[in-house]
Amino acid sequence: MTEGSLGAPTRHPIPWRDEAFYDESDLDSELRRIFDICHGCRRCFNLCDSFPRLFDLIDDSDSGELDTVESKDFKPVIDACTLCDMCFMSKCPYVPPHEFDLDFPHLMLRARAIDHRNGDTGWVEGQLSKTDRNGKLAGLAAPLTSLANWASHDANKLTRPVLEKMAHVHRDAALPEFHSDTFVKRAAKQAPAINHDAPGFGRKAVLYATCFGNYNNPEIGTATRAVFAHNGVETEVVYPNCCGMPQLEQGDLAAVAKNAATVAAEMAPWIERGYDIIGLVPSCTLMLKSEWPLILPESEAVQALAAATKDVSEYIVDIAKTEGLADGLGGIVDGVTVHIACHARAQNIGQKAADLLRLLPDTDLQVIERCSGHGGSWGVMKDNFDTALKVGKPVARQVAKAAHKHIVSECPLAGIHIGQGVERLPDAPDNINVAPHPIVLFAKAYGLEF
C-alpha cells in the first residue's frame, strides 16, 4: 500500500452495538493515533474548523507535539466536525484500504456516540434534532405556523434574543420556515398529469419527502414531481420519518438505526414493484445510500434501499443521458451560480447539480465546489455562526464576483447561509435570488406550474 493510493476508499461498518465501541480508553488511544497523523499531514487545513483547532491545539502545547496535549482538550476539535465527509472523500491519503485506516468523520461520530451514551450531549440540541416532531407541532394549524415563522425570523429583534438564550441558536442566523400545508398533504390532493409522449415515459419513482422537503420547503418536492411528470415519470410520495441525520450529528446511533429500519421497510414493496427511490435533499440521500448500510449492514432491506436510491439531480441527468428530456426547456435570464453541496460530493456521483443546470439553453452558469460553512444545524448555533460565516466567506466572494441573479445549492440550508454571507460583503450585489434547490429553477425553466 502506498501513500495517496489510487484505490477507491472503503468504509467499515460502524460497530455501534459492540461494547468495545464505547470504551473511552480505546477511543482516546485512537484519537491520539489519528490526530498525530493529521498533525503531520495537514492536507485538510482548509476544510472545516476541526483541523485548524486541532493543529493550533498541538502547535501551542508545551512540546508542540501531541504528548503534551490533555485529552479533555480534544472536545472543541470533535464538536467542530460537521460530518461532511469531505476529508474522507476528497483530501485524506490515508483512508482505508491504506494501512493507516484513517476515517476522521466516523471517529468523531464514535466520540459523540460515547458522549450521547454518557448523557453529555446538550438537551437543547437534542430537542432541535427532533425534526419530525418540531415540524408537526409548527404545522398543526396555519395560525400556529405563522406564529412560529414570525418568532424564528432573524429580523425579529423581540424573539430571537430569547431564542438565542434558551436554544443557543444565534440571533442572526437565518432559519428555514415551516409549512402547515406539507409536501405530503399537497401530493395527496392532486398528482400532475404524466406526459406519455416524453422519451422517459415508463419510469416510476418514489419521492422520499425528507423532513426538510415535507415541513420546511414543500416547493422542492412539488417542483420535482412536476418535472418528473413532464418527463413521463410516474411518482408517489412516501415519508415514514426523518432519515436521522440530525440524530447522527448528536451521536444517537440507535435512533438513526430505528429510522433506517422503518423507512427501509416502507420502501421495500415499492422497490419490489420496480420503483426508483429519489431523495430530495443530498444529506438525506447520503444517509440512505451510505450511512444506513454501515449502521445496519445485516439488513437486506437497507442494502436494497441503498442500491435503489438516487439524488434528484442525478436522476434527471440520467434521464437526459439515457432517454432524453421532454421538449419545452428554456433558459434562465441573468445567470445562475450553483454551489455543489458537500453531501452531494460525498455521494461520489460528480457535479450533478451543475450537470442538471447545464441542460438549460442560453444560461450563464458559475459552479462553486467549496464548503459553504453551514454544516447542518452546526452553523446556526450561537458558538458557531461567526465561524460558519468565516469558513463560507470564499464562497460568498465567488458568488459576488459572478454577479448572477440566482444562487442555488442542492443543500437548501447551505443556500440560505451563502445568501447571508453575500449580504455581509461590502460589495454585495443587489436583488439576488436564493433558490431552494436546482430542481426549482429547472421546473421554472420548463414553465411548469407547481
Image (cartoon, helix red, strand yellow):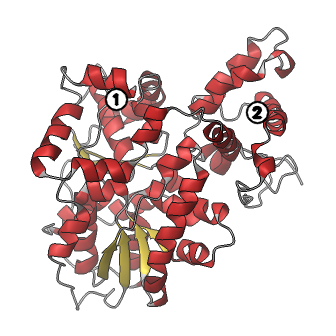
Above or below, comparing residue 358 to residue 93 in the picture? below
Image point (34%, 51%), residue name: 133
Q: Amino acid at mark 1?
A: Gly
Q: Nearer the viewer, residue 438 or 49?
A: 49
Judge left or right: residue 229 versus residue 285: left
Q: Which mark is residue 38?
A: 2
Q: Secondary structure at mark 1?
A: helix
Q: Amino acid at mark 2?
A: Cys
Give coordinates of residue 385: x percent, y percent.
41, 26
Give coordinates of residue 203: x percent, y percent.
36, 86
Image point (25%, 67%), residue name: 184
Q: Which mark is residue 421?
A: 1
Name the image quarter holding the C terminus. bottom left
Q: Nearer the viewer, residue 189 or 11?
A: 189
Give coordinates of residue 73: x percent, y percent.
70, 20
Q: Residues within 10 Å of mark 2 (few under 14, many from 20)?
A: many
Image point (43%, 75%), residue name: 277
Image point (82%, 38%), residue name: 30
Name the image quarter holding the N terminus. bottom right
Above or below, comparing residue 162 to residue 364 in the picture? above
